[in-house]
Amino acid sequence: MTLEEISKKIGISRTTIYKVLRNKDGVSEETVKMVQDALEKYHYVQNRNARNLAMNRHYTIGYVGFRSKSANYFATEVGRGLKRALQEFGDDGLTLMISEFDVEKPSEQLAAVEEMRQQGVDSFILSYSSHEVILQILERLEKENCRIVLLSRDVAEHPDNYYVGVDYYRSGMLAAELLMKLMPEGGRIFVPVTEEYKTNQDILSRLSGFQDRLKTCEKLEMLPPFFGLTGEREIKEALEKLLQEELDRKPDGIFDLTYRLDVIADVLKRQKKKIPLVGFDLFEEIRGSVEDSTIDALIYQDLSSQAYRAVRMLFEEMCYGKVRSEKKHYAKLEIIMKENLIYF
C-alpha cells in the first residue's frame, strides 16, 4: 500500500506519517505507535533509493583506521562491516572513503583526515592508535562541526562524540569471572601486559576491571603484572622463565593482555603445560589453540557489526536527520570456547 492509502485507512495525515518515518518531533507517542503498527500491518517499506535519487543527494563518510601486523584481524573485520553497510545503503547515496594507516605511524592518520577534509568530507569514523594524535584530530574536526564516531576506542577528553565499541572495564571483570570458574581450587594468575598500555587506556581499564572482580575471590591471587612486553621474543622469554620458577611462584592460570595469544599458547604447548588461559578476540592463528583447549576461553567483540553500526548511525543522521541522544553504544561481549567455536 502507498502512504496515501495507509493515511486514509488510519485517519492520520501523510505529513504526520512522514514525521514518524523521519523521526521528527511533535508527534505523540500514541500516534507514533499507531503509525508504526499500520506500517507493519500493511508491510510498508520506504523507497529510500527513489527519494534520494529524486533529491540527487549523496552522503560521504570517511573511515580512517589502522593496520597492524600483530592484530591484522582488526582491519579485516572492520572492512567486512564497512562493506556490509555499503551494500545496504549504497543505492541510497552512501559513499565510503577508506584510508588505513600503519599502527606504528599514527601521523599518517592525521594526514589522511586532512586530505579527506580537503575533498569535502565532514563525517568520520575513526579508529586510532595514538592518543596524542587523535586529540589533535578531534580538536580540529570539532571546531569544523564534523560528525564523528570513534570506533573500538573512546576518548575521555571528548565525551560528546559518538562511540561504538565495548565496555573494557566490564570485559576485564568478565575475564576474572571466567578464571574463577576455571580455577575452582584457586591459585595464582599471571598477567602479561603489552608495552602499549602506556598509551592505551583500554588495556588499563581491562586490567582494573579484572583486579576489582578478583578481589571478591579469596582463593585466587594475581601475581604482579608483567608490564612492557613489546614483541614475540619478550613474551616467550617472560612466560618460559616464570614457568621454570619455584613451585610457590609458578602461575596456575593466565590472563593475557599482550594480545598475542598465539605466542602464549605456543609456549604452553611446547612445554606441555595445561593451565587455564583466557584472553581477547578471535583470529585465525589461534583457532587451533581454542579447538584443542590450550586457550580455554576468549572474550569476543564483533568488530564487523560495530563498524556497520557506526556507518548506519552517521548515514541515518545525514540522510534522515536521526540524531541519537545516547552517545555511547556498547557492543555485547560474547564468550568463545571449544564447544561453540564453530559459530564464529
Image (cartoon, rainbow, N blue to C red):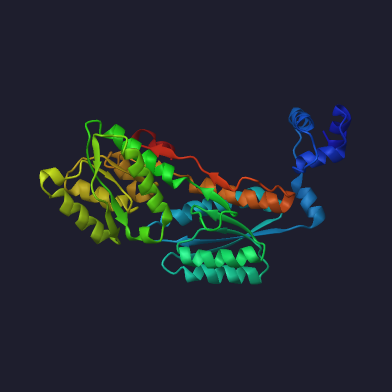
Above or below, 197 against 182 in this view is: below
How many numbered circles are shown?
A: 0
Seen as rendered, the residue at the extreme left is 246
Q: Is residue 20 left or right of 326 when viewed as pictured?
A: right
User: Does residue 97 appear anywhere in the picture?
Assistant: yes
Above or below, 124 against 217 in this view is: below
Which residue lies at the image location 37% right of the left edge and 61% below the top edge?
198
Above or below, 12 against 68 in this view is: above
Residue 338 location in percent, x, y? 34, 36
Which residue lies at the image location 80% right of the left edge and 37% below the top edge?
27
Residue 286 location in percent, x, y? 33, 47
Query: Which residue occupies the foreground of this view, 70 or 106?
Result: 106
Q: Which quadrant holds residue 60?
A: bottom right
Q: Is residue 105 left or right of 3 when viewed as pictured?
A: left
Q: Is residue 65 left or right of 327 when viewed as pictured?
A: left
User: Does residue 91 appear anywhere in the picture?
Assistant: no
Which residue lies at the image location 45% right of the left edge and 40% below the top edge?
333
Residue 203 location in percent, x, y? 39, 52
Q: Which quadrant holds residue 300?
A: top left
Q: Which image quadrant: the N terminus?
A: top right
Q: Which image quadrant: the C terminus?
A: top left
Which residue lies at the image location 51% right of the left edge and 67% below the top edge?
109
Residue 206 location in percent, x, y? 39, 47
